Amino acid sequence: MAAAVLVLTAGCSSDDGGSPGGGSAAASSSDKGASPTGRAAEETPPAQGSVKVVRTVAEGLETPWGLAPLPGGDLLVSSRDEATITRIDSETGKKTELGEVPGVSPAGEGGLMGLALSPDYASDHMVYAYFTSASDNRIVRMLYDEQRPAGEQLGAPDTVFKGIPKGFIHNGGRIAFGPDKMLYAGTGESGDTGLSQDKESPGGKILRLTPEGEPAPGNPFTDSPVYSYGHRNVQGLAWDSEQRLFAGEFGQDTWDELNAIKPGDNYGWPEAEGKSDDAKYHNPLAQWGTDDASPSGIAYAEGSVWMAGLKGQRLWRIPLNGTEASADPQAFLEGEYGRLRTVVPAGGDKLWVTTSNTDGRGDPKDGDDRILEVQVS
């Protein structure tokens, strides 16, 4: 596979877009991940894909961050700064506020962030949220009662996990239930780089928890929620059709990353950023100059990972062959909709994509922020 040659320039890729970086995308082999599972050649996605924005589903959203599709097709979206959760009718775009989540303390890159539905949502109607409180980042769950009046439909938060370090930057924030029905959370090191290598700290990690917030059975470290470590700031989690986990990660001076996640592996931060020659660190399967990405949400569809870029203001496609990129990453929507925050599968060849231009770092235009329906191949 050909690798692009990049000029390394100083910068900082963070949730807020950071300061200037440089370069473009390069794919590299993931040297320690699970090997490809023998996908037939015709199943490997083509090197060139396509993206078509089908429609704007909703507009006029304030600092949208998390996005969770409901059974039946409607969407729940969180407002980072307003600490509210709103239901979006996916056909008409009508917005219905469920309520405000108590205890959220928005500041900098923190606030009400990731959302996820319980794996037993059909029976328990529980919505999980990751947010910044006055003292930490934490994960809570709330009963969603559609029969109550608008604005009063959320039950009191039940804290399932707390003590994730908070900061003005690098709060992580993405949560998702995996194919194993366990709760995964991408966290940041809150600007304290040493936390990423400290397996006793939940900062700078991917955590794997039971729905009740306990360390999940089978985790790589005994009685620990830590699933992988050495991360700087993880805001993207997605599984492929073979139930392999991938994560998007903000770099600092040089490289943003897409990683194939192997339980117990060390992803290098702060000792390594991007690909390293040190065998104890798990190398990314693709990396980007910090001007071109600032990766937040990711999703898997049509044989590729699709990654939202904040500072990069584009949607990246990374075609996969197992846990390696089968071709160089490809960019779409560059500059057309501004900063992109979240990408969620919408079934088949469709994705939901949210913009992030009202987060204090963008250039809001009439109608921002939006949810887009996108068709990909």
Image (tube, grey):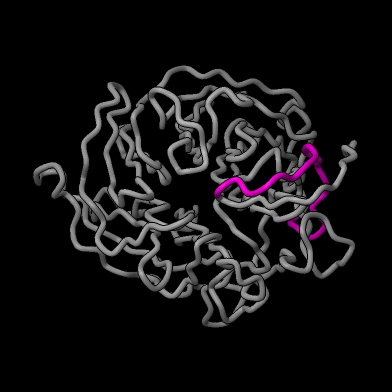
Estimate the x, y position of residue 84 in percent, counting from the top left: 28, 48
Write the residue at 54% across / 35% down: 339
Question: With respect to residue 367, does 344 lie above or below?
Answer: below
Left or right of residue 16, residue 72 in this image: left
Question: With respect to residue 201, does 178 lie above or below?
Answer: above
Which image quarter: residue 316? top right
Left or right of residue 83, residue 4 in this image: right
Task: Please say whether residue 29 is one of the residues in the magenta stretch.
Answer: yes
Q: How many marks?
A: 0
| Quadrant into which the N terminus falls | top right
Write the residue at 13% across / 49% down: 152
Task: Please say whether residue 175 is one of the residues in the magenta stretch.
Answer: no
Write the residue at 39% across / 60% down: 131
Observer-nearest of 361 and 245: 361
Main secondary structure type of the part rendered in magenta = loop
Estimate the x, y position of residue 196 in percent, counting from the top left: 64, 71
Span shown in magenta: 16-34
Estimate the x, y position of residue 318 in percent, counting from the top left: 70, 36
Estimate the x, y position of residue 140 in percent, counting from the top left: 33, 64
